[in-house]
Image (tube, rainbow, N blue to C red):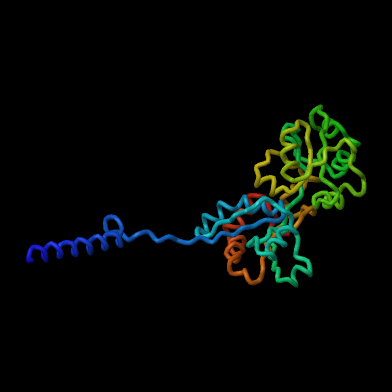
Amino acid sequence: MKTQRSYLAVLVIFAVLCLAACGNGVGGNPSPTVTSRTVLTISGSGTVTSILGGIKPAFEADVPDYTLNVLTGSGTGGGVEGIIQGTLDAAAMARPPKDEEINQGVAYVEFGQSGVAIYTHPDVGLTGLTTEQAHAIFSGEIVNWAEVGGPDQIIILCVRDENESSTQSLREAIFGDTPFPETALVQTSQSDMQAVVAATPGGVGFGSWPAALAEKAGVTALALDGIAPGAPANSMTAPVGIGYMLDRQADVQPLIDWLFSENGRAALRELDVILER
């Protein structure tokens, strides 16, 4: 009986030691605590989603308990619809919310401006145009780069549809009502525009310059009348902002705070987002 009791005592002590070891981890170190991460799923404006995708690594490095899940752009309206329906945590917005959206509880913070750029295939070799030259190119009056100081190369013109925001910005600033020539290649998305211009010798197109930088598009931006697309003096801009439902502000606020922090502003400047006007 005494031997049996001693054996049971040994088993009890062994079990206690095992439990202690499990609680302290290997070598007596505390077990690592699993930290829950907040995932922010964002979609909307193609320009703003590209910018957010570009700053994602810097944000997640500075705010390690947050993850940005940036989905392919669905347009500002699609982003707003997503936050209202609860399928998105935040909306990438290239405009302030409309009155009916505000009435449904949509809040909005603008964190910069995206400059529209005219850009070319790198081999064109130009760094700038005058607005008159740009107008003549996009109207089809100038058809060879040699006419504006470039190589003896046919201009391959790429445009977007008339309802697209970049088209509207350039019409207000440069093109006016002059129609694009029938030979122009109409691109259905910003990514398509960047890819076609980058792959086509003599190609020229336009779009958000911060988005092109964020996506490493491989195109060359042209200054217009000496004004670079990322300069505060550029009048061809669109807002970039974050939309969210008021009852979700606490979840989105760390991203907004970071976008206005010193590190956040530095990351946005790397993409030529215009922060001061």
Q: Residue furthest left?
A: 2
Q: Residue at x 82, y 52 (%)?
A: 169
Indicate the quadrant containing the N terminus: top left, top right, bottom left or bottom right.
bottom left
Residue 24: where, in percent of width, then height? Answer: 30, 61
Horizontally, residue 262 falls left or right of residue 119, namely left
**Quadrant of residue 277 within the rendered picture:** bottom right
Q: Residue at x 75, y 65 (%)?
A: 97
In the rendered image of this protein, does residue 107 appear above or below residue 196?
A: below
Q: Residue at x 78, y 35 (%)?
A: 203
Q: Residue at x 76, y 38 (%)?
A: 120
Q: Residue furthest front?
A: 1
Horizontally, residue 56 falls left or right of residue 272, namely left
Residue 79: where, in percent of width, then height? Answer: 70, 59
Residue 174 versus residue 87: which sits nearer the camera?
Answer: 87
In the rendered image of this protein, does residue 82 appear above or below residue 157?
A: below
Residue 101 versus residue 265: which sits nearer the camera?
Answer: 101
Q: Tag count in the figure? A: 0
Residue 10: where, in percent of width, then height? Answer: 15, 62
Q: Residue furthest top?
A: 152
**Quadrant of residue 8 within the rendered picture:** bottom left
Residue 241: where, in percent of width, then height? Answer: 69, 60
